[in-house]
Image: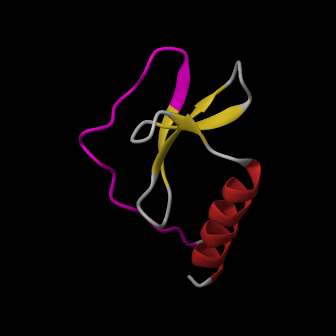
Amino acid sequence: MAYSVWETSKEFGPRKDLEGPFTFVNGRVLYYDTKAGEYWDPRTDFYVEQSEMDLLHDLLAKAITKH
């Protein structure tokens, strides 16, 4: 079994009522809001649209399958 490790940012830490932070392969850091059922971007203070999350998950899957 193989795995990849991505750098995590020191500026993002745990936040109350949110899961994460999750660092994606493109460097984007997001938190998951379990109450809203959506990912939240702390840099913009907006929730991320599902279509954008689908693209991020596709990038992650492609990065994992390369190894």
Is 44 magenta? The answer is no
| Residue drawn at (75%, 49%) of the image | 50
Secondary structure, magenta segment, majority class = loop
All told, the count of numbered labels is 0
Residue lying furthest top:
16
| Residue drawn at (74%, 29%) of the image | 37
Q: How far across and how far down the image is residue 61, in percent?
A: 67, 70
Q: How far across and how far down the image is residue 47, in percent?
A: 61, 37
Would you say 6 lies left or right of 47 here? left
Q: Quadrant of the C terminus?
A: bottom right
The picture quadrant where one finds residue 11 is top left
Figure colour scheme: secondary structure
Image: magenta residue range? 2-19
Is 17 magenta? The answer is yes
Would you say 12 lies left or right of 65 here? left
Residue lying furthest bottom:
66
Residue lying furthest left:
10
| Residue drawn at (56%, 72%) of the image | 2
Q: Quadrant of the N terminus?
A: bottom right
Q: How far across and how far down the image is residue 49, in percent?
A: 70, 47
Closest to the observer, 3 or 16: 16
13 w.r.t. 6: above or below: above
| Residue drawn at (67%, 61%) of the image | 57
Q: How far across and how far down the image is residue 43, in percent?
A: 39, 41
3 w.r.t. 65: above or below: above
62 w.r.t. 60: above or below: below
